[in-house]
Image (tube, coloured by chain):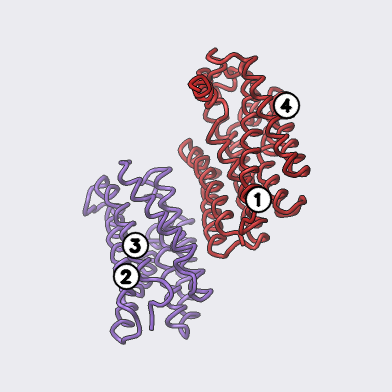
Chain colours: A red, B purple
Amino acid sequence: MIAIFSKVKQYWPLIKSLQTGLLILTGVAGYVSARCPIFNLGDLLSLIGSLFLTVSGSTVLNMVWDRDIDARMNRTKRRPLPAGVIDSREAWIIGLSLSILGLLWAIYLNWLFALVIFAGLFTDVVVYTIWLKRRTAWSILWGGISGGMPILAGRVLGVGAVDGVGMLFMIGILFWIPTHILTFSIKYAEDYASAGIPTFPSSYGVNRTRLMIAVSSLLSAASIVISGILMNLTTGYLRLIIVLAVGLTGLAMGSMFNASERINFGLFKYASLFMMTSMFMVILGAR
Amino acid sequence: MEQINKVLLLLVAIVAGIQIVSGIEGLGTIPIAYHTVSYGIFLISAIFMILLGVDIIEHDIAALAASLLPLGFSMGLVGEHMREYHLEYSSLISVLYAGLFIQKLRGQKKMALILQVLLHGISGLMLFILPIILLAQGHAESSFLGVSVGTGFIAIGGMALGFLKSGKPLLTKNQIYTLFPAILLLSVLAYSVGIGPGQTL
């Protein structure tokens, strides 16, 4: 038992618990947006379980593949894999096992739901991490698509089909993810350069990257607000999402016209807060 | 920024968020829209101050956005309690605000200051006096006075900032930055007590 706990403790940093938690939250929001009040607690718990396993699994696989890059970057060189704390072959097996277990659980739940989750897993591990990340700065688009899959999967499980609201939710996440990645790529530009990773700042300059962050934040906010309207979200909760979206728009504009490190990083943090709060509002205000 | 101030600002954001979601539910569509703007300013400014620092309140854009706070509440109250004057009042306030916006953009500081004083003076007086009059006439619950109290707190914060910007500070910059989150919290709490369905008879 102690050995298992110590293994879990060792691997916990590999699954990026905050990011995984937020992606699971989006999946729950997608599900509850269609199935509220929740009639089937079993389905909800299975959704959380299968998402946890697949998202964690893909994150571990991502870490295994990128361990050489992580070793060259100051920000990431102390992660368990580049630091040599965890054996990469063992991590590979665990990442693959978690992903397969999560997919099997998803297939047991609903085949279309499983298909969407598989699309997310494939896009994240194969298209984004293995194929494009080291080749083009535009790889983040695929990172965004894979990040949008949990909310689409949740919606699919609730509705039983891929619908417009689910797609808009996915687009909302798709445009939110570049805000994250691009802000990091500006803040840690030297790190990425030393690892040889093409980024927007290195390919198109910092100003265009800031413009890209602002535009993607605006598109993310608009998609989430429109999704809220289309899903007939309770007006009070919709009002709060709109207010937060206005704040995001204001900060995005500020970062375009009055660019600074402080505003840029503030936008990054605000965008995360916006997404988390919006997801809670969708969960609480669905009817 | 000290942790206690971050906690106070977080409380401001939470209280404003609760008011937006449920506190103003049951009022008419127009008051809800205006009050959402004002509580939205409380919410967004509190989050911005946590993320970017309290000193953002000195920025010109922050001053423009902050002006919406008394405007929204006052137009909401006029829309609810003085419907016959709503069009005239909102037209006057909108024209003044548009003027302020344009003067700020053009960098006309003196003209912008005059418009700002007019705008805050009119909306502030409306917010301070209307609840007292309605209470005196027996048309409101005593809790409606929360609006006047909230306006008083906002006025204290606004004046302290105004004197600071004009170069004749009543308090030092650090003292104002330290007190500002508490003033915001007291103000949003007072407005929450005063604004809502069933406050007027």
Is A255 above or below relative to A55?
Answer: below
Do the residues at discs 2 and 4 belong to one chain? no
Seen at 52% across and 54% down, the residue is A244
Q: Is A144 or A184 nearer to us in this picture? A: A144
Are the residues tagged 4 and 1 within 8 Å (C-beta)?
no
Mark sitting on residue B189: 3
Give how far across and how far down residue A35 sits, in percent.
66, 56
Which chain does the residue under circle 1 lie in? A
Count neighbours of disc 1 (C-alpha within 10 A) and say few if under 14, some if 14 to 19, many if 20 or more. many
Seen at 65% across and 50% down, the residue is A30
Disc 4 secondary structure class: helix
Disc 1 secondary structure class: helix
Q: Quadrant of residue B127?
A: bottom left
* CA gap, disc 3 and disc 2: 8 Å
Mark sitting on residue A132: 4
- Residue assigned mark 1: A31
* CA gap, disc 2 and disc 1: 41 Å
Are the residues tagged 1 and 3 within 8 Å (C-beta)?
no
Give the quarter of the figure containing the C terminus of chain B: bottom left
Q: Amino acid at mark 2?
A: Gly
Nearer to us: label 2 or label 1: 1
Q: Amino acid at mark 4?
A: Leu
Residue lying furthest left in this view?
Answer: B170
Q: Is B199 or B162 nearer to us in this picture? A: B199
Count neighbours of disc 3 (C-alpha within 10 A) and say few if under 14, some if 14 to 19, many if 20 or more. many
* CA gap, disc 1 and disc 3: 35 Å
* CA gap, disc 4 and disc 1: 31 Å
Give how far across and how far down residue B68 sits, in percent.
44, 63
Which chain does the residue under circle 2 lie in? B
